[in-house]
Amino acid sequence: MKFIMYHYVRPSHPDLPYFKHLHIDDFRRQLDYFAAEYGFVPRDEFLATLEGTAVPVSGVVLSFDDGLIDHYRYVLPELEQRNLWGLFYIPTGIYARRKLLDVHRIHCLLGRFGGQAMLDALGELVSDDMLSHSHVDEFRERTYARQDNDAATAEFKRILNYYLSYEFREQVLDTLMARFFCEEELIDEYYIPRDRLAEFEERQMLLGGHSVSHRVFSRLSRAEQQHEIQECFEFLESATGGLKLRSFCYPYGGFHSFNATTEELLQAAGCRFSLNVEPRDAEAADFRTRPQAIPRYDCNAFPYGRCREPLAV
């Protein structure tokens, strides 16, 4: 069973010449490729696997992170047209604030101005005493290795997502967004509307948790992790009138992004499985022995899954 991870799936836009996304036409081509090479796991057979009444069948399971409007506008119609289903993971804090999640502010800044310009601007705002130096070597080696980033883009993302202390990150991004964007114009066009979430489950998709604030769980205390998990699931249960099942995927992903405490808390919250980022097929043993770390491929590991060249190039 091959779990595949997607984020932005959309047409290109001239206002975001450096924006990293999978073009909707390439998404369609990749679905055609998966259909020809592997096939897709039927929803009922997937649910039977979770119930333990069937072994994992071969085929593809599609998953989409971050609650992006792309998934409602482009992905959902495409899946329904092909009689396919998918897993959609929602960071629920997007509905409680009038600004983008920090991770998406980073994407917008990079998408409009490119990595070097943003790294230069960041250097004016961040001093060494604002950085957390624990695990720097681990994060440098294990983050963004499979993404097509230039060196400046990767360093900008590492500083803001992994090195900069959380007490400073939002303030730094507030400053950058105020300097380079009118954020108020972006908010309502960025995420799936809250009143559309239930529609996904009604249309035979499955919704899952992606935390509240999309922070790196391995950087959080036990209490902070528990809040992120509990509040996320409670919101989704309320917004949908009850989830078909509870599942989760880790913000950023990879074994560096969560720990044993995370897995324990998810298990206690009734989470049936959680998706990691590890490029291999999921086997029956994964669901039995470590269901909170199910492996998942990035879409860019397969034909048609890479971002196109930036418009600015």
Image: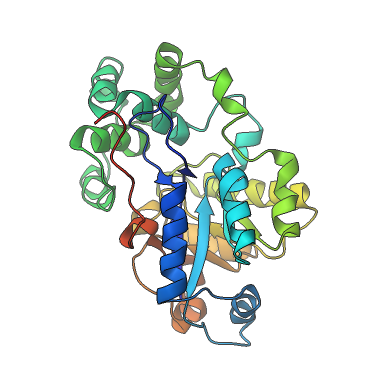
Residue 195 vs residue 23, the one in the foreground:
23
- Residue at 31 percent across and 32 percent down: it is 311
* Image position, residue 125 (x, y; %): 31, 16
| 170 relative position to 94: left or right | left
Residue 132 in view in this figure: no
Q: Foreground: 108 or 140?
A: 108
Q: Residue at x 62, y 42 (%)?
A: 92
- Picture residue at 40% right of the left edge, 31% below the top: 106
Give the image location of residue 310, x and y in percent: 30, 35
Towards the viewer: 302 or 284: 302
Give the left or right position of residue 239, taking residue 263 as reference. right
| Number of marks | 0
Residue located at (51% from left, 15% from top):
182
Image position, residue 187 (x, y; %):
58, 27
Residue 232 point in image, percent of width and height = 63, 48
Vertical relation: 111 (above or below) 172: below
* Location of residue 103 by image quarter: top left
Q: Can you tell which quarter of the image residue 190 is in?
A: top right
In the image shown, does 25 or 63 lie closer to the viewer? 25
Q: On the rendered structure, is 252 left or right of 222?
A: left
Query: Height in image: 111 above or below 38?
Result: above
| Residue 246 versus residue 283 in the image, above or below | above
- Which residue in the rendered view is the most extreme toward the right? 241
